Image (cartoon, rainbow, N blue to C red):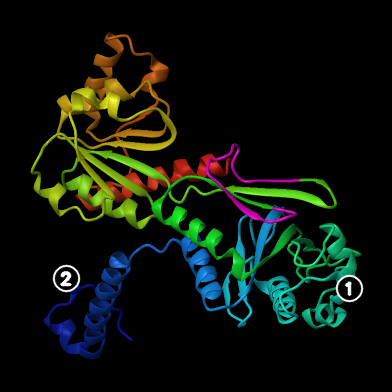
Amino acid sequence: MPRLQGKAELGKRDMQQCVPQAAKMVVLVLFYDKERSQYFERPIVNKELQFWKNALTALERGEECMVLVVVESIGSSPGRAGFKALVSSAGELHGSIGGGSMEHKLVELARSQLKTAGSLRASEQPAEAWESAGSSARDPAEVLQLSGSTENDPFLMRQIHRANEPTDRSGMICSGEQTIGFYLLKLSHQPLIKKLAEKIATGINGTLRFDHNEISLLTEPIKPGRAFLQPSATEWTYIEPLVTRPRIMILGAGHVGLALSRTMHQLGFHVHLMDDRAELNTMAQNQWAHISSVVDYASIGDVIHSDPELFVVLVSFGYRTDDLLVRQLIRKPFKYLGMMGSEAKIKTLFVGLRKDGFTAEEIGRVRAPIGLAIGSRTPEEIAISIAAEIISVRNMASNPL
């Protein structure tokens, strides 16, 4: 079969010889363009928000639920800390704690618990539920003793992904370990779950706490963020931040700012777009920024405060505005500070900064020219190169080698 060529390569003779192939090519191109458009236009789904909305919907239908949450993950494990699964008394499953035989076993256990009137009574714990769930881990009473359980109390299950372990075997052999907390959501939990969903939807920071007594919502974020503490067999606390999305400030609402807003929105960032030009067409066209502001660049240092979790991108009108902005921001701690421009412009700007007393360390904080070197030319390509660099910075910071 002749090789499928690009449209520019297909001459008259090629078209005559490869009519079926060319037709396939046209169909494939149209289909790809359609799918690509659908992909880029598809709204971002906040999985954490959707998880708790599913819980709230089930409770509103009168269904109790079991929340399974990975509170600790060690080594190679299919589910990392924070992975969650929701099992309703109607049998519905949302989310995941990692998949595989372990998830199947624990989900079946959760379903069996919900079928016994939603209670976790040690005296009523059916051993056959464990057998049907395929558990080779431990006696049901021993599991409940982990939490000092009375009826409906949370409990923990440790799962070891090694075939030669005498207890707590998950049925998987990926060599790591996981600890999963089980929490019963009763109809009386509706106000808590509703408040939690609202908090996530509005992007307000906070902390979600799972302990040996309950699930609770704290209004303030707690450092260091995600953590699991277990001082005794009957006491534990797992906390995770409710920071729903990373935040980026884009200074410059021109064509690159427009393309970058779209890309970062699709990557799940909260986008704040700023420019000093009112009535800018590209700002009016920008439907991707969550916040758009017209600001005075001369006082940008009073508008953007130090924030070690904030990504800041300078794609402003030109040399003068870039220089004005970077001088006010360069000494503030950010997760990322990048500036667009040619190598010649950047070199001239940095020479001026050194002459005015900015140190090499301070200047080194600015990633310029911004973005990964992929030969970008169009605003969309530049946006992709910037986004790739930002993702690299974010992921390397959270998972250092």
> Looking at the picture, which amino acid does disc 1 mark?
Ser
Residue at x 33% of width, y 86% of height: 1
The residue tagged 2 is 8
Residue 123: mark in rendering: 1
Q: Quadrant of residue 27?
A: bottom left
- Residue 372 shows in the view: no
**Front residue (pair 352, 323):** 323
Magenta region includes residue 227: yes
Q: Looking at the image, do the residues carrying marks 2 and 1 touch, with CB atoms under 8 Å apart?
A: no
Residue at x 79% of width, y 67% of height: 151
Residue at x 16% of width, y 70% of height: 8
Percent x, y of residue 159: 78, 63
- Residue 87 shows in the view: yes
The magenta stretch is 211-229
Magenta region includes residue 221: yes
Q: Left or right of 286: which side holds 171? A: right
> Helix or strand or loop: what does disc 2 sit on?
helix
Percent x, y of residue 368: 31, 31
Q: Left or right of 265: which side holds 243? A: right
Query: Relative to 236, is 167 above or below?
Result: below
Crowd rating for badge 2 (residues with CA inside 10 Å; few <14, some 14–19, many 20+): few
